[in-house]
Image (spheres, rainbow, N blue to C red):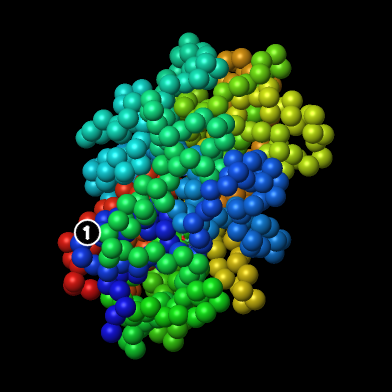
Amino acid sequence: MRDYDVVIVGSGVGGGAAALSLAGTGARVLIVERGERLPREPQNTDPEAVFVERRYRARETWVDGAGRPFSPGQYYFVGGHTKFYGTAMFRFRERDFEAAEHEDGISPAWPIRYADLEPYYAEAERLFGVHGRHGDDPTEPARSSAYPFPPIPHEPLIGQFAERLTQAGLRPFHMPSAIDLRPGGACVRCGTCDAFPCRVDAKGDAERCLIDPALRDPNVTLLTGARATRLVTDDAGKRIVGIELDVGGEPRVVRAPLFILSAGAINSALLLLRSANAWHPNGLANSSGMVGRNYMNHNTTALMGLLPWTVNDTRFTKTLSLNDFYFGCDDDRAPLGNLQMLGNISEPMIRAARPSLPRWGAAWLARHSVDWLAMSEDLPHPDSFVRPLADGRVELHWKRTNMAPHARFVERSKRLLRQIGMRAVLSRPFGIDTPSHQCGTVRFGDDPALAPLDPWCRAFDHPNLFVVDASFFPSSAALNPALTIAAQALRTGQYLRERLGTF
Ligand SMILES: Cc1cc2nc3c(=O)[nH]c(=O)nc-3n(C[C@H](O)[C@H](O)[C@H](O)COP(=O)(O)OP(=O)(O)OC[C@H]3O[C@@H](n4cnc5c(N)ncnc54)[C@H](O)[C@@H]3O)c2cc1C
C-alpha cells in the first residue's frame, strides 16, 4: 500500500532541488513542510520586526553542551532558510573536495570530486539565476559554462573599496549572487536582503526557484504545517515504509516506497535519532554512530568598518568578496577563509545585538559603517553533535575548531579594512545561536563504518532513504553552502530519476 511514490521532508534548497528533479517523471511526490508560506507583509523588510521582535524565528529553545538555553536562528517556512539568506551563491573550490591539513586537524576528503558536481553546479546557478563573472576570483574552480547573468555592479562606495583592494595588490571579485538585479528585474534595492525575506520575490530562494516550479507538475503536492515526527521501518528494520506526521496537531501516517529527508542538517539528524526502534536503538541510518555528530557551522565574524565622515547609503551591498587568503598566504600558511560583504546593518539590528547601546549611538554606527563577514572553515569532530533530550528539548554541542587561524584572519581583515579607508573596525563573532551554515550531521562517504550515507546520499542501512540537505557535507569549506546543497540534491535527483520504480 502506498499513498505517494516519493515523500520529501522539507522544502528548502535540498528538498526543493530533489522535488524539481522528480517533477515531470510521473511519480507522485509529496513534499512535507512543517512551516507555512511566509506571508508577504510590510514586516518582511522591517528590521524592528525581524530583529527586535524576531517575528519569523522559530519559537524554540535549545541547550548548549553546558546545558545553557538559547534561542536558535532557525526559520521554518516554505523555502527553508533561503527565505532569509544573503543570496551569496558560491561553488566550493576543487581543493575543498580533497583532504586538507588545517591547524586543528584534517578537513576530510569528499567521496566525490568537484568534477562530479560541476554540471549540477551549473544547473543550480541557472535555476537560481546567479549573477557573477568568471576569472576574477583567484581560487575559482573550472566551469563548463558562463554565469547565467553578468555580475551585479558595485554601488559607488563599494566600488571604491574594490578599487583600493586592487591597488593594495589583491584580487577582489564580484560576489556570485542570486538576486534578480538585471535591468528591469524584480529587485527594488529596498536596502534589506541578507537575513530578511524578500517582499517582491526578487531573491532567488528555494520557494521561488525550486518549489513553485516543481508544483507546476500536478503530481507534486506540498503539504504545509506538517511536521515529520518519525520514520517507520518494515519488520526487518531495513526499509522505510512510512512517515509519521503531526499535521496541525493531528497525527497522520504517509506510506511510500522512497523517502528523501531534507529538513536541514540539525532537524534531519534529529528525525533519524528520534526514529530509533528495536532494530536500530541508536536511531535510523546510524550503524556508523555518526548521525548527529560532526556538526559544523563555519567560524564567522561580522566586521563593522567605521567611516566617521561618510554616510553609507549603499542599498545592495553584497557585491564584493575576497578569496586571496582562502588557502593561506606567504606569511600564514593556514587556510584562512573568505571575506565578503554583509547586508546592510541598521539601527534596530545593532540594538537587538547590543541592547545597552543608546539608540543614537546605534543609529550613528549604522549610518557610518560598512559591514563585512570573515568566514573560516570549521572542522568535523565526533564530539560536535546534536541530539534530542529525553524531555523533548534539543542539545547542540558545538565543539569549535580552527579558532586560532580564524582569529588571525579577523585581525588581518581588520588591518586590510583600515588600509582601504575605514578608521576603525569593530568585530562580533557569531555564536552557537546562529546555526546558519549548519552541516555535517549525516555525512556521506565511501565507508559505512564512518558515514551514514553513500556518495549518492543514500543511507547505507536503508536502501530507500536519502538525505539531501547540508547534513551530507563531510567538511564545511569556507564558503556559503546553499549552491553546493542544491548541486548535490540535483545530482541525487538525477540518480533517482533513472531508478524510479525500483524502490
Ligand atoms: C540569515 C541567513 C543568511 C544566509 N545566507 C546565505 C548565503 O548568502 N549563501 C548561502 O549559500 N547560504 C546562506 N545561508 C545558509 C543557507 O540558507 C542554508 O545553508 C540552506 O538554506 C540550507 O538548506 P537546507 O535545504 O539544507 O535546509 P533548510 O533551509 O533548513 O530547509 C529545511 C526545511 O525543512 C523544514 N523542516 C524542518 N524540520 C522538519 C520536520 N520535522 N518536518 C517537516 N519539515 C521540516 C524546515 O521548515 C525547512 O523548510 C544563510 C542562512 C541564514 C539563516
Q: Which residue is at 78% across, 29% downward?
A: 361
Which x, y percent locates residue 340? 50, 31
Which x, y percent locates residue 216? 30, 56
Q: Which residue is at 34% across, 37% downward?
A: 129
> Does residue 454 appear in this view?
no
Quarter of the image where the N terminus is located: bottom left
**Figure check: 63 above or below 254:** above
Which x, y percent locates residue 244? 44, 78
In the rendered image, which residue does mark 1 sit on? Answer: 24
In depth, the one of 442 and 261 nearer the eye is 261
Q: Which residue is at 43% across, 62% downward?
A: 10
Quarter of the image where the C terminus is located: bottom left
Asked whether, in this view, residue 196 is left or right of residue 469, the answer is right
Q: Residues within 10 Å of mark 1 (few under 14, many from 20)?
A: some
Quadrant for residue 416, please give it.
top right
Which x, y percent locates residue 9? 41, 65
